[in-house]
Image (tube, grey):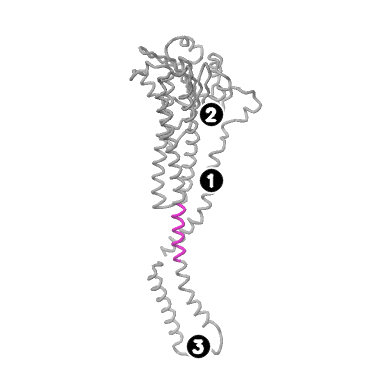
Amino acid sequence: MKNSNNTNDVINKIIEVPKTIIEAQINLLKQLAPKKKKKTSSKIGLPPGSIVYLGEKKVEKVTITLTEYDENNAETYEIKSVKEIDPFTDTPQVTWVSVCGLHETEFLKQVGEKFKVHPLVLEDILNTDTRPKIEITDDYLFIVMKLMTFNPEQKILETEQVSFILGRTFLFSFSEKSDEIFNPVKERITIQLGKFRKRGSDYLLYALMDIVIDHYFLALEKVEERIETLDDEVINNPEKSQIESIYNLRNLLLMMRRSIWPLREIVNQLIKDDSDLLDDSIEPYLRDIYDHTIHITESIEQQREITNGLMEIYLSMMSNKMNEVMKVLTVIATIFIPLTFIVGIYGMNFPNMPEMKWPWAYFALWGVMIGVVIFMVFYFRRKKWF
């Protein structure tokens, strides 16, 4: 009875596989579809460069911090308007303005007017679906990147947009949430670790970009851990819930690939460009993060192949179980075929069947049928069919 229940469970799982795959594909398409919270329709009909935030409000209050430093001093201030930046604009010190939260657009408008930033650049900062990109002008350099961080409470990877505007002595950074990931840079500035404060705003840009790119390694570590766990689960105990997990991993790796691939071109363009905003001494550092982007891209491709292999392994395991079930059913059916034939013959009501009048015919027929069963079981055992 127990074996029968196990067989039914396997058959039910196999029958549900196509349905589960379809459901996982539908969930994947929903995740890739535009979010309703991003009101793209509000931009329709507006002139290019309109300052409209098209992202999700991820913080209640926008915070703006200004850090000014040189080789000898470093100071950090909380500011609320661009007018408070005026005393720091014409100084030789490096000025870093960090904006956390993008839903209040007035400050961004003031930045555009004060530093003559093109309205289309401001529009890209507020559109959190902007593809990673770089724009280089004579007065400033604009970069959009995607940051991936691991949420330990919900155990998920979160994505947000980070933008930079680099001038000769200043750097603006714009993030959707907090800039806590940049705390290591703030500490290096505050306690003067290494030669950080002796370098310009271009080195500060490199340091921030390096942190964003390094977070892809952390994200990949979490993905690899999940893939290893899922690999063991699929091999040892395949379940239909694992299909959705595999599709979610494929979706995540696809998002990472779409985010990291343009970064290679961004860093490569920074290396090759002769802009006055970048000193020649920063080129080795840019080459280093370029190598990191290549490493991440190769790792993502490798994990995608492993994920695709997981799906094939899952389907193979379920197919093997199905084959085992079908083999048992086939053996049972084969054993009963000759018995059915014998019973069918002697179930005919012809008066001229001599065996019907033998006293021991009933017992003899049972002996023949039992002998056939024993012979076939022995034969199947010898052939190792079960």
The three-letter amino acid code for the residue at tag 1 is Gln
The answer to whether residue 350 is left or right of residue 367 is right
**Position in image of residue 110 (x %, y %):** 55, 15
Q: Quadrant of the N terminus?
A: bottom left
The three-letter amino acid code for the residue at tag 2 is Thr
Q: Quadrant of residue 307?
A: top left
Q: Residues within 10 Å of mark 3 (few under 14, many from 20)?
A: some
Determine the secondary structure under disc 1: helix
Q: Quadrant of residue 109?
A: top right
**Residues at marks 3 and 1, CA–CA distance in whole angstroms:** 64 Å
Task: Note whether 340 is above or below 53 in the view shown.
Answer: below
Q: Which residue is mark 3?
A: 356
**Residues at marks 2 and 3, CA–CA distance in whole angstroms:** 89 Å
Q: Is residue 316 highlighted in magenta? A: yes
Q: Residue sitting at 47 percent across and 74 percent down?
A: 336
Task: Note whether 370 is above or below 277 in the view shown.
Answer: below
Q: Residue sitting at 55 percent across and 83 percent down?
A: 348
Q: Residue sitting at 62 percent across and 23 percent down?
A: 48
Q: Main secondary structure of the magenta part?
A: helix
Q: Which residues are magenta?
A: 314-328
**Residues at marks 1 and 2, CA–CA distance in whole angstroms:** 25 Å
Q: Is residue 98 highlighted in magenta? A: no
Disc with the residue nearer the chain's start (3 vs 1): 1
Q: Which residue is mark 1?
A: 25
Disc with the residue nearer the chain's start (2 vs 3): 2
Determine the secondary structure under disc 2: loop
**Position in image of residue 269 (x %, y %):** 49, 26
